[in-house]
Amino acid sequence: MSQKPSIPKGTRDFLPQIMIRREHIFATIRQVFKKYGYAPIETPSMENLSVLTGKYGDEGDRLIFKILNNGDFLKGVEHLDDAQKLGYEICDRALRYDLTVPFARFVVMNQNELTFPFKRYQIQPVWRADRPQKGRYREFYQCDADVVGSDSLLFEAEFVAIFDEVLSALRLPGFSILLNNRKILSGYAEVAGQSERFGDICVAIDKLDKKPAAEVQAEMLSRGIPQDAIDTLFNIITFEGDNRAKLAFLEEALASSEQGRQGVAEMKEVLDTLEFFPSYNGTVKFDLQLARGLDYYTGTIFEVKAHEVSIGSICGGGRYADLTGVFGMPGLSGVGISFGADRIYDVMNELNLFQDDRPTSTKVLLINFGGEGYKSSLKLLSKLRQAGIPTELYPEEAKLKKQFSYADKLAIPFTVMIGEEEVKNGLYQLKNMFSGEQISISESDLIESLT
């Protein structure tokens, strides 16, 4: 009995046409990362569970895909309760939730091989046990860049420039690069008299772009935050004005908070440094309500949202003061960003930004007539490929209509015909499959015209 094929919810197959588009996104991101001095690394798809848990907050930890131990580790154990009593671990590994925590583990394990500040980029899939919906998948790619071993805010400014350069190169017509600082968020909690509920406040504020303010305030009340403190918080985070006006407002509003003042000073330095970088299609916005839910962020935080498309954030990141400390290497500050390649793809697809819709990179199809023409085609096939021209030879002798149909379906722009007559006179028939124009051309001119 045959089985109906299926894949897990939240995962996808990618056809060649989609992969060509995705590779264009990856290549654009990779090129800019390298331009700014970042080197590639890779880490395993799975990590020890202890590496991941406790780093993302309660909500993040619930989305970790745990891997059930297999093999005979429960051999001789009849009941699950017995296994737990004996100290057996049902799950001690997990698929990575992001690339940042595994990177911190990587840095500690390989510290003697690295030169600090260490700048790396990484383009690999991650997994989250989330509810699949538009723009949200259980398996998706992240494209990260991080630098560890420096407290310099130059890197924060450079990451804003990287966001702007990459997304502008991908031709996104408009997007907002949102900035805030976790120390500023700490200042909110302190001036509201709720420092001990800093985490709850961050989680609630982080939901303001998804829920009405009244619902978020109700959630704060349910978490034990008093109404007068909520009023103080919202009086601060709802202030309107440009970036400089917000800085001036917070200097006064957070004057009683040392952490808050430090966060404002850091934000001012980042914005001042950005004035030395070119700007493209992005709008830099100091967002007083940006919180970013991950617990390991301690300084500047980033989020990027595309205009014209409702899909949530397409990039994010932030500074972490001591993420390596939990792995035995304290005091190593870092900052990093992540491009959500899958969401960027969805945005570009919705806005019709992909320029090449062809399902193949092949530029030339050599028509197979068999006989001496086939041998000549094999010789030409090698020469075209050596010249860097993506070329295919139709694998078998077939009717011309069938071979042209193959080229049409794959949107191959050119075909070359080498029959007995062409072998004799040394001129090939080059056909433009889009315009229908056909000319006789020598081998050297053919290679030159297609290069």
Image (cartoon, helix red, strand yellow):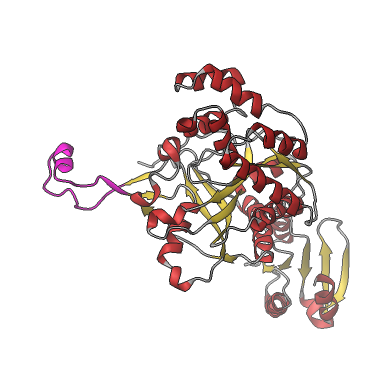
Quadrant for residue 34, please give it: bottom right
| x and y percentages locating residue 246 in the rendered image | 72, 35
Compared with 181, 133 (above or below) is above
Determine the residue positioned at 84% across, 81% down: 425
Whether residue 303 is visible, yes or no, is no
Q: Main secondary structure of the magenta part?
A: loop
Horizontal side of 27 relative to 65 (left or right) equals: right
**Quadrant location, the C terminus:** bottom right
Residue closest to the eye, 419 or 134:
134
Horizontal side of 199 relative to 185 (left or right) equals: left
Determine the residue positioned at 63% across, 53% down: 22
Determine the residue positioned at 25% across, 45% down: 90
Compared with 393, 360 (above or below) is above
Quadrant for residue 56, please give it: top left
The total number of labels drawn is 0
Q: Give the magenta range.
A: 68-92
Residue closest to the eye, 293 or 252:
252
| x and y percentages locating residue 287 in the rendered image | 68, 36
Horizontal side of 243 relative to 265 (left or right) equals: right
